[in-house]
Amino acid sequence: MLRFLVTRVSLIVPTFIGITLLVFVLTRLIPGDPIETMAGERGIDPVQHQRLIHEYGFDQPLFTQYGFYLFRLAHGDLGRSIVTHRPVIEEFASLFPATIELSLCAMLFAIGLGLPAGILAAVRRGSIFDHGVMAASLTGYSMPIFWWGLLLILLFSVLLGWTPVSGRIAVLYYVPSVTGFLLIDSLLSDQAGAFASALSHIVLPAIVLGTVPLAVIARMTRSAMLEVLGEDYIRTARAKGLSGFRIIAVHALRNALIPIVTVIGLQVGVLMTGAILTETIFSWPGVGKWLIEGINRRDYPVLQGGTLLIGGIVMAVNLLVDVAYGLINPRIRHSL
Amino acid sequence: MSKYRLLLAAAIPAMLAAAPVSAKTLVFCSEGSPENFYPGVNTTGTSFDANSQIYSRIVDFERGTTKVVPGLAEKWDISPDGLVYTFHLRHGVKWQSNANFKPTRDFNADDIIFAIERQWKESNPYFKVTSSNHSYFNDMGMMKLLKSVDKVDDYTVKVTLNTPEAPFLSDLAMEYAGIQSKEYADAMLKAGTPEKLDQEPAGTGPFMLVQYQKDAIVRYKAFPEFWGGKAKIDDLVFAITPDASVRWAKLQKGECHVMPYPNPADLDAIRKDANVQVLEQPGLNIGYLAYNTTKKPFDDVRVRKAVNMAINKKAIIDAVYLSTGVAAINPIPPTMWSYNNQIKDDPYDPAAAKKLLAEAGYPNGFETDLWAMPVQRPYNPNAKRIAELMQADLAQVGIKAEIKSFEWGEYRKRAQAGEPQTVQLGWTGDNGDPDNFLHTLLGCAAAQNNGGNLAKWCYKPFDDIVVKAKSVSDQAERTKLYEQAQVIFKEQAPWFTIAHSVQLKPVRKEVVDFKLSPFGRHTFYGVDLK
């Protein structure tokens, strides 16, 4: 297991450097510079422009800039935002809990619904339920997040009045940040109704963000289960007179889990991408919206730092998924 | 019995704590997060909105107008030559306090001098704190304009200029000139955390900052000791909501009281809502197509006039601006003082345009580029669509126009460098002074490389007038000069003036006395809730 972990971690280092290079080059390829973008219609005096470009070091050759960037990175410095002038790491740390909270809820929603739906669809293959799940998951997968979010707001918030329109909690509540996770902080704050308000605010964004992973998990679970259900050992288990539930839950599902866990791991990346749109629609103060703003304002340090941190997190989750394989299927550990 | 009493004694405070808050809380669904809490380096209206609640300025714009009224200065004297401004400051103005700062003195002249020098002098220890890009201070020409700023006594400040500048007071009423506490600045410098001055602000304005969470909320509380008297509302909340349709959904549900920038597609529904009123006012802006007067064939005034007559302005307003724009005749909006009502717009007359083109030596038309912005702007909802309509109109008189566009920053850079033959752009006024349009966008100084005069139009009779108007302090005389300048503008036609967009503000009916700012800003002092 140790060898397995060392091999996987050693792969992370070149990937990490690759991300820094790619992000650095890509941000510089976006036309327009941050000073020019900030100036708007007013324009900027060329002397002042040059002074600021020099102050930020943008007049240095690209490889020198990249070298400085790596040097600062090695010292744990991701730079300061050009727009807010605050350290990137500080901004990320203040926004990321909101994204995690939303992503976790979305994932819970996707797994909680997708797994049983996929299993049932496989068990009742060809039934109306099976066709229904497949059609619904295809629709969910194809739904543009922006449209889906607005549709749910119109229905549940405006027409039915069941959920709030956007935000993380009603403005009535002033919840001091302890963990950054509002569902926990609202409980800690001891304010009556704060938790219920935070919970009601997360329902719609979690559904919207969880829809694509839900569809993927449901379909993958179904196909993995179908494959396993056709195996000899399942037939043997049935012949032995085991209960249907035991066959599905213990014999079939455990063996079908590997591709499902892989897909769940990959969905972390999907969640991060989806969070960008979901956060914008639901005014959810997470890193997705922050990155969009970074692109619009050509805020290089935010783009570089934010992408790097998210990339690091996605890599870490994938590593955990790989470790989870080993736990689910010992053959994977032994093969390395 | 005593057990019940005990329970009751415990339950009552708990019930009170859970009861709805009776304080008047106004919620504004703002469109984004402020850049920081130092207006001197802010570049967006969103940031100015957040900061103008906290800070006061030496002078102010009267709510809902462009009229300059006393702020932290009760009154001022201007020397006859227009070079020396003596400000007499208010006594007893209190500073807000926060976790880092407990003021020991009232506001005084030291604060004014600190606020100006911070943006002006590189030697000031705060010059580079947060950013050295004091964008508006530079754009208003303060660097060159200021000669000295002196403290006469604790409540008198004398500002000396290098040249007379009539819009100087208006420039000082802009948000970038918000006054910070020198005492707070010194304390933070001593503590080694100067940036806290701009992150955890303390001003002398009507509201004090309570909480800021990026992309989520800005929460203020009325400052009870505000020099103008406590605000009518107790709490002010900016619920940051970037999507226009979601802002509308929140307004509809009563989750916010005021929203900026409605989505044009939602306007019909907004107008039909019985709980909401839509406040309207022509904005202090202009959308235009500039002809590069240094390039052929637009160096010929007849060609410019002909193109003006070839484009159907009404069709553009109807198709692109819908109900959110009014046709522009002059380069300044009709709500601005000195607007010349006598001027008639060039008529839409393709036949006359063709004739004029023939006179200018282009009987078969010519080829030109037609630049269109890649982004939606407050004065122009869809430049590409407008360019398509113009292209079709121009084809009718034989002019073959090729539409061009670039990334927004690149677009402006190239346009300011004078690359295009014709280019769409626009302007939103900063200080309500005609100088901010006529000299800034059409003066000879701005026609130089990278200046804001995209027509590169340097016409001496016009320039003489707008330069003179800068140095005259009598408004009646300035009005006459600017009216004359507008006549010359129309005759020389360096632009095809497209439209002034209308500012639309959906506000819930329980909001009392919200006034539209001509600058598109949002001020909540003086606003009440039913």
Image (cartoon, grey):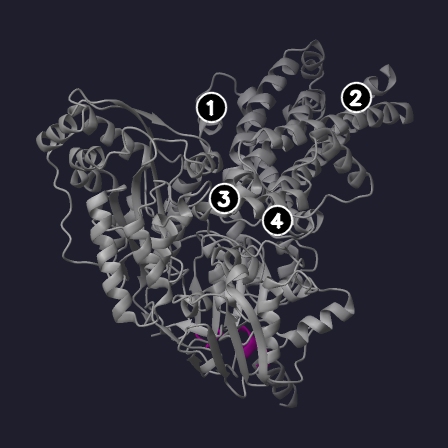
Which mark sits nearer the N-terminus, 3 or 2?
3
**The residue positioned farthest toward the right in the image shown:** A2
Q: Which residue is denoted by mark 4 in the rendering?
A: A98
Label 1 to label 4: alpha-carbon separation = 29 Å
| Comes first in the chain, label 1 or label 4 | 4
Q: Is residue B39 something one can see in this rendering?
A: yes
Q: CB of mark 3 within 8 Å of CB of mark 2?
A: no
Q: CA distance from mark 4 to mark 3?
A: 13 Å
The answer to whether mark 3 and mark 1 are in CB contact below 8 A is no
Are callouts 2 and 1 both on one chain? yes
Q: Quadrant of residue B143?
A: bottom right
Q: CA distance from mark 2 to mark 4?
A: 34 Å
Q: List the residue tagged with mark 3.
A: A280
Q: CA distance from mark 2 to mark 1?
A: 30 Å
Residue A309 placement, left or right of B420: right
Residue numbers of the magenta segment: B13-24
Mark 3 or 1: in front is 3
Does label 2 lie on the same chain as label 3? yes
Q: Nearer the viewer, mark 2 or mark 1?
A: 1
Whole-percent x and y of residue B383?
A: 32, 36
SS label for mark 2: loop
In the rendered view, does B371 fall on the left or right side of A36? left
**Magenta stretch encompasses residue B15:** yes
Q: Is B246 located above or below residue A176 in the figure?
A: above
Which three-letter amino acid code belongs to the residue tagged 3? Thr
Task: Locate residue B429, reporting x and y percent.
Answer: 37, 56
Q: Which residue is mark 1?
A: A138
Residue bearing mark 2 = A329
x%, y% of residue A55? 67, 46
Q: Amino acid at mark 2?
A: Asn
Residue type at mark 4? Ala
Measured in 3D between alpha carbons, the distance from the residue under mark 3 to the one under mark 2, in whole angstroms, is 40 Å
